[in-house]
Amino acid sequence: MTKYFCSIFLLLSTALCQAQSVWSKLNKDPFKNSQVYVGFRTGANYNTINIINRYSLIKPTSSLDEGLYDKKYQEVENIGIIYGVSFLYQFEQRLVIGANASVNQIRFKYTQDQPGSTRSVNFIHNHDLNYLDVPVFFRFMFRKINSRFWDKKGRKPTVPAIIPFAQVGLNFSMLMNANKEYSKFTTQNGIESQEFEKNADIKSLMSPFTVGAFVGGGARVRVGTFYITAEANFRQGLSNANNQNARYLNENLQNEAYDIMDDFSFQSVEGLIGIIFPLKYLSKKEFMPVEI
């Protein structure tokens, strides 16, 4: 009987020591207060143009007609797509720094008229640009700070399933390609006809690099061992998107459409959905991620 009780005591002691050892190991884990994520993101943007300086080859004969030949920027079809990868480092329950690498499509359109008493001409210019975007940002998570210690029963610290956040950052963009489609329409005696529709590579007319800032917010949602993020941002360009030194470089545009670029920057509102995966695990065997 004594041997029986001794055996049970030894088993219980061993189990208790193992449990204590696991609990101590979890609470002494040097990585428990940080996490690294990698993921993918995609979405769409709505873009508008902020004019810095206007330029035109056609000049009015009267000061009363100063804005007659100005480009008229449209705001209906300026929708582009965004897709790329995300990298995040959460070093505290509420604080995250991150960077993205994305392809960002920017579309915009303007028209330019040459009115006349019997014959008028209308030019339509559609632009399609693709940038390699690298936004670098700081994110604040709106959540209560909880204890990071595991309890003695081996239960992990509680983390909200849905956490809203706000973010602010800088955006660095490199132009990948830029194309322009321009058309000429003539109206005479009430009859409109299209004279031509052409395409041009305008990468050389654009600045190769632009810088901007953005502010936004969203939420992170836990789904199993990964997370889904939804965010909306307002972006403001801080530099001229046009290459001032190449304004008169494309002679075909000047001769056929009397077109030269204004100086402008981009403004846009974007919405994105992403999926991020944690890279640090407490247990590689069970793929139990460090949750903060």
Image (spheres, rainbow, N blue to C red):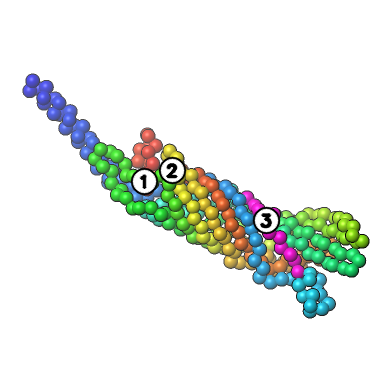
Q: Which of 39/249 is in front?
A: 39
Determine whether, in the image, residue 282 is placed left or right of residue 272.
left
Q: CA distance from mark 3 to mark 2?
A: 33 Å
Q: Secondary structure at mark 1?
A: loop
Residue designated by label 3: 78
Pointer 1 or 2: first along the chain? 1
Amino acid at the residue labelled 1 = Val
Residue 146, horizontal then vertical, whole percent: 32, 50
Is residue 72 a member of the stretch shown in magenta?
yes
Determine whether, in the image, residue 260 is placed left or right of residue 275.
right
- Write down the quadrant of residue 263 in the picture: bottom right
Determine whether, in the image, residue 50 is placed left or right of residue 259.
left
Q: Please state the extent of the stretch shown in magenta in the rendering.
A: 70-81
Question: Which labelled disc corresponds to residue 123?
Answer: none
Quarter of the image with the N terminus in it: top left
Residue 140, horizontal then vertical, whole percent: 43, 56
Residue designated by label 2: 222
Residue at (65%, 56%) from the top-left corner? 106
